[in-house]
Amino acid sequence: MKKVVVLTGAGISAESGISTFRDSDGLWEQYRVEDVATHEAWERNPKLVLDFYNARRKDVIKAQPNEAHKQLVRLEEKYDVRIITQNIDNLHERAGSTNVIHLHGDVTKCCSDRNLNKPYPIEGDTLSYGITAPDGGMMRPFIVFFNEPVPMMEPAMELCSQADYFIIVGTSLVVYPAAGLINFVPKSVPCYLVDPKEVRVSRNITVYTEKAGTGVKKVVDELMSL
Ligand code: APR
């Protein structure tokens, strides 16, 4: 089976009602990254960080996968589909995608602040302050904060280097290291990009300047017809 590698960002979940980060109504217009999404923020004011991610988790639990998530599941009928998502929601999995790498974590889970690589489930929608992990650390959201290492980059780079087709959906491609993944895709591999706004990519790529719900269907229809 040929391998389709898909890199997704906040835009694929926008039509499910989840805010993106850098659009005019995006989350980083309402919050400062330094206050809620860095390791320093967690050390300084963990309650504020917990509140921020508790609100994100509530949004995710309420949301449903949209047409774009579902179309990527359909692609599995013909291809070995590997999704690399920057999103902290679980809408790809809930749609039915079987291979999903979360580069930036999963807000529905938590981990000890002494071991960021071992996720635990969260019961309900709230992670309360002061819960102790089995290793004695404090439970925090299972999120890769800004300026923390991204442990899933290695397997993601490996997947990109093995792609037969590469699709990018709904990401501004400004956050590294994720934005650099396209450089690991061999130059001969056909690439597609779906985004209603212009996104700068330094290679030949077929662009669908539209929302994920309609654009991903077009890419999937094309790959299914090959
Ligand atoms: N369909 C497809 N794309 C859309 C839609 C839509 N309906 N609506 C918006 N977009 C596009 C925007 O045009 C933009 O290019 O989604 C992209 C969202 O970009 P960002 O808000 O920057 O989100 P993302 O690229 O996922 O951010 C990367 O930054 O803050 C961090 O950790 C956070 O994982 C996140 C990372």
Image (spheres, rainbow, N blue to C red):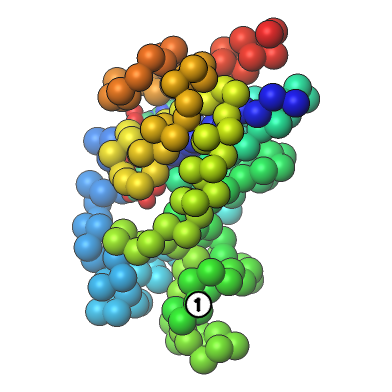
| In the rendered image, the vertical position of residue 90 relative to residue 72, given as above or below | below
| In the rendered image, the vertical position of residue 226 relative to residue 115, given as above or below | above
Q: Which image quadrant is residue 65 in?
A: top right
Q: Is residue 122 visible?
A: no
Q: Is residue 222 visible?
A: yes
Q: Quadrant of the N terminus?
A: top right
Q: Residue at x 48, y 26 (%)?
A: 186
Q: Residue at x 61, y 41 (%)?
A: 92
Relative image position of residue 86 (x, y in whole percent)? 45, 45
Residue type at mark 1 is Asn
Residue nearest the viewer, comparing 124 with 143: 143
Relative image position of residue 2 (x, y in whole percent)? 69, 24
Relative image position of residue 5 (x, y in whole percent)? 57, 32
Q: Secondary structure at mark 1?
A: strand
Residue marked by disc 1: 115
Q: Which image quadrant is residue 52 in?
A: bottom left
| In the rendered image, the vertical position of residue 81 relative to residue 164, given as above or below | below
* Disc 1 crowd, CA 10 A, few/some/many (<14, 14-19, 20+): few
Q: Quadrant of the C terminus?
A: top right
* Outermost residue toward the right in this view: 77
Residue nearest the viewer, comparing 100 with 203: 203
| In the rendered image, the vertical position of residue 213 relative to residue 116, given as above or below | above
Relative image position of residue 18 (x, y in whole percent)? 45, 43
Ligand 1 quadrant in view: top left
Label 1 within 8 A of ligand 1 by Cβ: no
Count of numbered circles on the image? 1
